[in-house]
Amino acid sequence: MRNYGEDAKLTSRRSATGLVLVMSAFGLATGKANGAALPPEQKPTLCDDVCEKDLENVPMVTTESGLQYKDIEIGKGPSPPVGFQVAANYVAMLQSGQIFDSSLEKGQPYIFRIGSGQVIKGLDEGILSMKVGGKRRLYIPGSLAFPKGLNSAPGRPRVAPNSPVIFDVSLEYVPGLEADE
């Protein structure tokens, strides 16, 4: 039986390698073309420059599992019960700040069932204690992130196995739960 998923991975790797070789030949892989630096890529974020500066003064919370987080904004709505669906926006980054996934670029919140294993453990745990309308930066240790790693999408960095990752997440709504009035 043919495994098309594996074929796609091999094709992606070959394509990505070829792209890197072409980019290197033109000096693009290093961020320079004809000796000039390229402008940084602008990607939508949940935390702008002011937010980043404010986060320096926000206390870090560490859970028993090793998950750490800082609240960017505390929500006023309900917290999601285990088993309920949630709609959340997120920006997923390596520790270097390189974005490897983002719901903002897809133009709609990601909807999943909380506590059911549909997302990585650190994201599940981090959202469970949030309130609707809240924003949080999650510092997720490798054991709660991608134990097997995550292959990169085109133009995105790869996540190595057991690498810590950072998620900025906003809990948009919990379908079926009304906000406290």
Image (tube, rainbow, N blue to C red):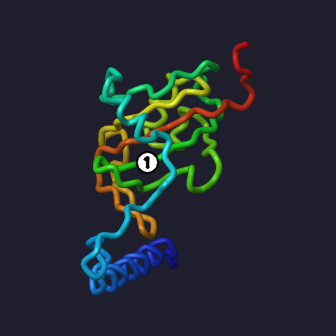
Tell me residue 21's x, y (percent).
30, 84
**Is 69 situated above or below 91?**
above
Residue furthest out toward the top? 181
Q: Report the quarter where the C terminus lies.
A: top right
Locate residue 131 relative to residue 28 in the image: left or right. right
Tell me residue 61's x, y (percent).
34, 22
Q: Answer whether residue 61 is visible to the viewer in this image.
A: no
Identified at 65% across, 30% down, the residue is 84
Can you identify the residue that label 1 sits on? Answer: 92
Q: What residue type is labelled 1?
A: Ala
Along the line of sight, the residue nearer the viewer: 10 or 23: 23
Residue furthest out toward the front? 36
Tell me residue 87's x, y (percent).
63, 38
**Is 98 situated above or below 128?**
below
Other-residue count near label 1 (Cα within 10 Å), few / some / many at <14 / 14–19 / ≥20: many
Identified at 42% across, 35% down, the residue is 50
Identified at 59% across, 39% down, the residue is 88
Identified at 40% across, 81% down, the residue is 15
Location of residue 68 by image quarter? top left
Locate residue 25 relative to residue 8 in the image: left or right. left
Along the line of sight, the residue nearer the viewer: 38 or 86: 38
Q: Is mark 1 on a helix, strand or loop?
A: strand
